[in-house]
């Protein structure tokens, strides 16, 4: 990864889900020195009152106390397995079930309770940057998967040009490449639109005419 690591957290907002007990004053004062404000959402019937949809990934950091079972409900992205904003787990009792719950929330860093000021920056640095790196990796993987699926459209478009325009494989591919560059589209998207425009109307039986592949097999376009 070539991404620059975020080192300055000024302007951030920490949303700390915990029951106030005095230890959190160290966290709050240390975050203030780093330019991060702190808010404590109200907890009603064991659930923190947070509008998840209003959180902003470029500003908000969610600190979740692992000792509060079920205090926060977040739907992680099924592709990246990440929550909407960076989550840092506050760890008191190191029970496997509580650590697992924090991991399932998408926590990318942990901070032991009672909090020591010297550990806050490291936890913040790891939590936010791991969140950003994982999000970027997921985006890249999704892009590669989309291109992989798009390659099928390229193959079909090449075959269609060979059949309808009498070009050889290299000539058909080169023409599609030139035309996609002229249209300022990536090859895969251009080929999908090309196939849609050149699609033949259904024959009298109501079936769409297919492309004849090598060996006599047909593939619908």
Image: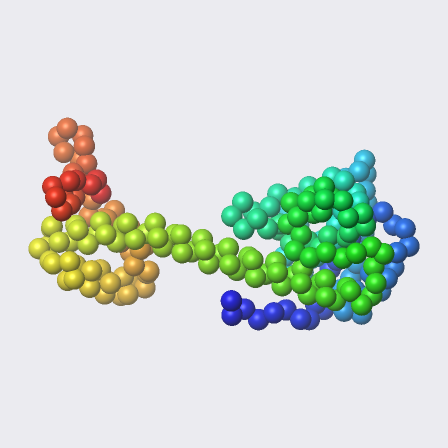
Query: Position of 117 compared to 175: left or right?
Result: right
Question: Residue at the spot x=18%, y=30% of the render?
Answer: 206
Could you tell me residue 66's position as x and y percent? 76, 47
Query: Position of 47 compared to 134: left or right?
Result: right
Could you tell me residue 179's position as x and y percent? 23, 62
Could you tell me residue 131's position as x and y percent? 61, 58
Q: Residue furthest right?
A: 22
Colour logic: rainbow
Question: Residue at the spot x=25%, y=46% of the render?
Answer: 196
Q: Residue furthest left?
A: 166
Question: Residue at the spot x=78%, y=65% of the render?
Answer: 119
- Asked if residue 66 is positioned above or below residue 8 in the image, the reply reads above
Residue 60: which quarter of the image? bottom right
- Asked if residue 18 is positioned above or below residue 220 in the image, the reply reads below
Residue 29: which quarter of the image? bottom right
Q: Quick one: quadrant of the C terminus? A: top left
Question: Residue at the spot x=81%, y=35% of the render?
Answer: 45
Task: Report the label total.
Answer: 0
Could you tell me residue 21's position as x and y percent? 90, 51
Q: Nearer the viewer, residue 98 or 79?
A: 98
Query: Position of 219 compared to 101: left or right?
Result: left
Q: Residue furthest top?
A: 205
Q: Could one spot residue 117 in this view of the protein?
A: yes
Q: Could one spot residue 28 in this view of the protein?
A: no
């Amino acid at each position: 990864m070539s991404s620059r690591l975020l080192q300055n957290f000024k302007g951030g907002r920490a949303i700390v889900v915990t029951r106030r007990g005095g230890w959190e004053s160290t966290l709050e004062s240390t975050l203030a020195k780093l330019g991060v404000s702190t808010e404590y959402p109200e907890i009603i019937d064991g659930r923190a009152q947070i509008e998840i949809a209003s959180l902003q990934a470029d500003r908000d950091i969610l600190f979740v106390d692992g000792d509060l079972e079920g205090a926060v409900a977040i739907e992680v992205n099924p592709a990246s397995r990440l929550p909407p904003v960076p989550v840092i787990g506050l760890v008191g009792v190191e029970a496997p079930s509580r650590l697992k719950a924090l991991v399932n929330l998408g926590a990318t860093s942990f901070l032991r309770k009672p909090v020591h000021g010297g550990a806050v920056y490291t936890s913040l640095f790891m939590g936010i940057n791991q969140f950003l790196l994982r999000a970027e990796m997921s985006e890249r993987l999704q892009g590669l998967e989309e291109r992989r699926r798009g390659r099928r459209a390229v193959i079909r478009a090449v075959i269609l040009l060979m059949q309808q325009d009498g070009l050889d494989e290299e000539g058909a591919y080169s023409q599609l490449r030139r035309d996609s560059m002229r249209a300022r589209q990536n090859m895969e998207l251009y080929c999908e639109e090309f196939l849609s425009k050149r699609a033949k109307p259904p024959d009298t039986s109501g079936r769409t005419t297919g492309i004849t592949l090598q060996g006599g097999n047909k593939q619908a376009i």
